[in-house]
Image (cartoon, helix red, strand yellow):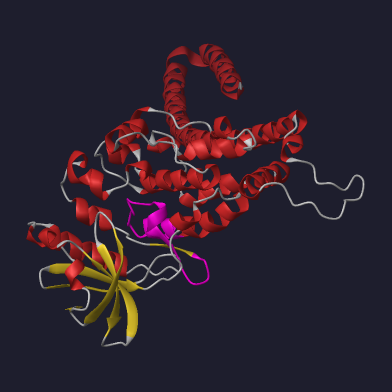
Amino acid sequence: MVSHLTGGTLGRYNILESVGRGGMATVFRAFDSQLGRVVALKVMPSYRSAEPTFLERFRNEARAVAQLSHQNIVRVHDFGEDKGFTYLVMEYLTGGTIKDLLSRRLTLSETLSLLSPLADALDYAHANGIVHRDVKPSNIMLDSNGNPVLTDFGLARVMRGTESLTREGLVIWTAEYMSPEQALGRPVDRRSDIYSLGLVAYQMMLGRTPFKADTPHDTLMSHIHQPAPAPRTIDASVNPVLEAALLKALAKDPADRYRSASEMVRALGATDPLLASAFDVAIAETVSGPAPAGKPAEPGSEAPPAASLLSDRTIIQVTQQQARTLALQDARENADFYGKEMAGAEVALEETNKQLAGMGKLVQTRINRLHGDLCGVVSTEQTQLGATGTTNLRERYSGFLRELDKFLKQD
């Protein structure tokens, strides 16, 4: 238990109060007596220190995460061990978490404003060889300006170790935000984080996660075996392009997902402005109801309701736009493929030309040798046949050379 630490110290840190508790650690507001600043102190359960490899995993991950420097990744100031506890020292954020915002559905513009910097932070961490493994709303905090900040990088790997998900793992991790490969206990890479970020995006815009069963085990089985519910079955005002982008992020096979978190966000943002506006209007009316009555609007100036914006003609236009986008993508992929094929063909042609040049030299050498042999025969025959026989032989030889010349000049 760590609750008794309030009012005490760990290392140089005076523990002021508990501000949060999860399956992996307890977070305290603390005061750094050496640097004179308030920090967040994340303290792991003391029994973990007795595990053979825990301290080594903890130190390695803490050092790696401390090297990250990104405005949307929480800064790790220090880490240490004291009184049987291990702890991380981080910047103290006061804006709460994104989880606090999800009491209502977010508009597309609100969603993108939060996801864009988070995607940039994840791509930065991935480029530095670090996978988060536990992207979820409660691990996305907000600073005093409302900017999202990712926390708990690498902590899931430290805390899990070699434990089975069917034991303590189900308490530590939130099954709603786990990727299929995590649920299966397989190795994970950046694409697992992209899946989890896709789940967060899904929840932001639709007001629910795609998978939530009666038990964590059943939720994990849904991640593994069940396709995510199509967003338009939940809300018909969802742009079909947006729906396709969300479902791609939630593909069961990691190879079918986006290559980066930023690519996913760009796909979500590549939405027809008219339908995006209709979706945002629909969300706003769901949250606050229709706009209050006021001064009567001028005839023809009333904003059309969301349902009328989602006309068949508009949806067809967006579908056509999506088809053009996919066609362009296919054309680029085909161009890359045939470009590589052409490059390979050029290399093969160059090699063939070299071989033909070598063969030409060999043929010329043999012709020269044959010419020399024939000249020797003519000289010998000249002495044996006399003038008349030699003349006939020369004519036959000259005819042979003309025929040989014609043959060599043929295409």
In the rendered image, the quadrant that contains the C terminus is top right
- Asked if 329 appears above or below 403 in the picture, the reply is below
- Asked if 28 appears above or below 354 in the picture, the reply is below
Q: Residue 369 sits in which quadrant?
A: top left
The range drawn in magenta is 121-147
Question: In the image, is 175 to the left or to the right of 377?
Answer: left
Q: Residue 42 sits in which quadrant?
A: bottom left
Question: In the image, is 407 to the left or to the right of 361?
Answer: right
Q: How many marks?
A: 0
Measuring from the top left, give residue 13's x and y in whole percent.
23, 80
Can the viewer see residue 235? yes
In the rendered image, the quadrant that contains the N terminus is bottom left
Measuring from the top left, give residue 279's x and y in whole percent.
66, 43
Question: In the image, is 132 to the left or to the right of 357?
Answer: left
Measuring from the top left, give residue 147's x and y in whole percent.
51, 66
Residue at screen point 40% across, 65% down: 73
Magenta span contains residue 120: no
The one nearer the camera, 1 or 229, is: 1
Can the viewer see residue 259? no
Measuring from the top left, give residue 323's x and y in whole percent.
65, 32
Q: Residue 405 sits in which quadrant?
A: top right
Residue at screen point 10% across, 73% down: 83
Furthest residue toward front: 293
The one nearer the camera, 120 or 165, is: 165
The one nearer the camera, 391 or 169, is: 169
- Asked if 235 appears above or below 158 in the picture, the reply is above
Furthest residue toward right: 299
